[in-house]
Amino acid sequence: MTDGTHANLDRLLQSACIRLGRPQHDRLNWLIAQYGAPTLDSTPDGRSGNVIILGEPLSGAAAELFYRSLNPASAVVIPRSENPGFDFLKSKLTEFGTVGPCGAEGPHEMWWGGIGWSKFLASADAPAARPRIVSCHPRGSDATAAFALRHSLERFDLDCHIEPIETQFSDRVLCFEKAEFMVRMWNKYREPLLFVEAGAVLREAPLLPSFLGCDVALHKWNRWEMSARTLYLGRTDGAEALLRTWQQLAASYPAIWEGYLLDQAWSLTSSQMPLDTVWLPRSYHALKGDLGAMRATILHERQTTTMELGPDPAFAGIVRTARRAGRTGARDAFMVMTSKAEAGSGIAVILRDVSASDAGTVAATVEAVTGAYAADCGGYGRLELSLCAWQEDAGAAREAAAQARYRILEIAPGQQIANDFFAYHASADATMTARYLFP
């Protein structure tokens, strides 16, 4: 992008009071280079491509008309996508990826999507860094599946590492065993890693994640349930943070389903750093028996009726809805910030009734809270901010914060948040403690 294009983009964002962190800005610049000039809250020109930045939600007929006006040459970017007001439109579009909040600098999740993957799939043939394909299978088990994967790789000139590992069971690899294997591969190799389940075969070179230049890429089964059968890790700090968080959770809870643990690792990581995530198309996670199996890039051997892939009855309905809309749920803090305060105490701020307020008001309140914490943390070592659309969400967030023994504050969109907001509440807490100890 030229300096003039950068200046035009900055003016466009400023006109809508949209704040982006550097990683979000970089992703938006990349999209502009792919699709063309950005516009704000406009109906796309069906004759040419561009990037449409949505500052406010569309609902009902307006969202339907907007969706019908799009074509594969247009991309949609939602800089404040944590707001549930955008859910309806997002559910109609193909979700390409998200970039997590960037602290006080850019305290929102940025979502990007469009109409199908055809444009990217046609372009993803010469990425700067080709991935190394890695896979593992139980030692002593039938090696036929691993051989099929290795054989399918030969015509694509991709480096690979397929290894038999020691496992508790002879017929499967548990989550903590897979995570430990991935950490070893991360430490051993320097290129991006693409884990593919043993037994899968490659029909095309899997270069899309490298071309997109993301931190992590994976597929969401049924649009909400994360799968660890195809998992890409770029050589970035964000990818390493996700991997090590997943390993720690898997080691702590070895009996829990791997997709749920990966989901939780993603939630924790993306709330604490601007994780650049790509949600891979079904062609990277096709199963035998799928209607689109003949057009698959990665074809897994299991049928679609497998019990390992959705819907998992133990997965909470409140989380399914949020993942389907491409955002975190109330039980997961939307954003986590830390300070240099020596005190280990944390504070949870619950922003309630976000569905009843316009996106600009909610965004301004989020920015005010994060800005106040950055200016004066009040001695709280950790801030967890949760966005709650309904009273049920707020109750779940309060319960989670109470279990963590956090100070809980509940606020409403549009509420005035002064720079000493956290210091004021810390002082009030100290006064109450003193009165209790010295009546």
Image: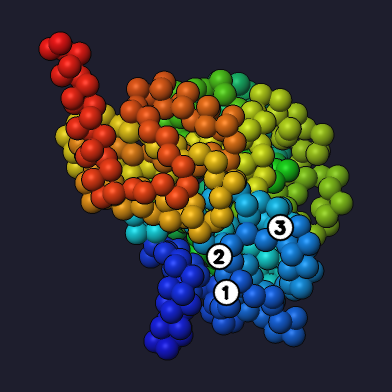
Dot 2 or dot 1: first in sequence order is: 1
CA separation, marks 2 and 3?
A: 13 Å
User: Is there CB contact under 8 Å for labels 2 and 1?
Assistant: yes
Q: Residue 390: image x %, image y %?
A: 59, 36
Q: Which mark is residue 106?
A: none
In which quadrant is the C terminus drawn? Answer: top left
In this rendered view, identify the residue nearer to me: 176 or 239: 239
Q: Amino acid at mark 3?
A: Ser
Q: Amino acid at mark 2?
A: Gly
Residue neighbourhood size for the residue with mark 2, other residues' Cα within 10 Å, grouped as few (<14), some (14–19), many (≥20): many
250, above or below 294, in the image: above
**Is residue 67 shown left or right of residue 397?**
right
Is residue 436 visible to the viewer in this orientation of the structure?
yes
Q: Give the structural element (helix, strand or loop) at label 1.
A: strand
Q: Residue at x 26, y 29 (%)?
A: 345
Residue receiving disc 2: 55
Q: Residue 169: image x %, image y %?
A: 60, 21
In this rendered view, identify the residue nearer to me: 346 or 362: 362
User: Is there CB contact under 8 Å for labels 3 and 1?
Assistant: no
- Foreground mark, 3 or 1? 3
In this rendered view, identify the residue nearer to me: 160 or 405: 405
168, above or below 258, in the image: above
Residue receiving disc 1: 40
Residue receiving disc 3: 59
Q: Give the structural element (helix, strand or loop) at label 3.
A: loop
Q: Amino acid at mark 1?
A: Leu
Residue neighbourhood size for the residue with mark 3, other residues' Cα within 10 Å, grouped as few (<14), some (14–19), many (≥20): some
Q: Residue 53: image x %, image y %?
A: 57, 70
Q: Residue furthest left?
A: 438
Q: Residue at x 34, y 59 (%)?
A: 105
Q: Give the structural element (helix, strand or loop) at label 2.
A: loop
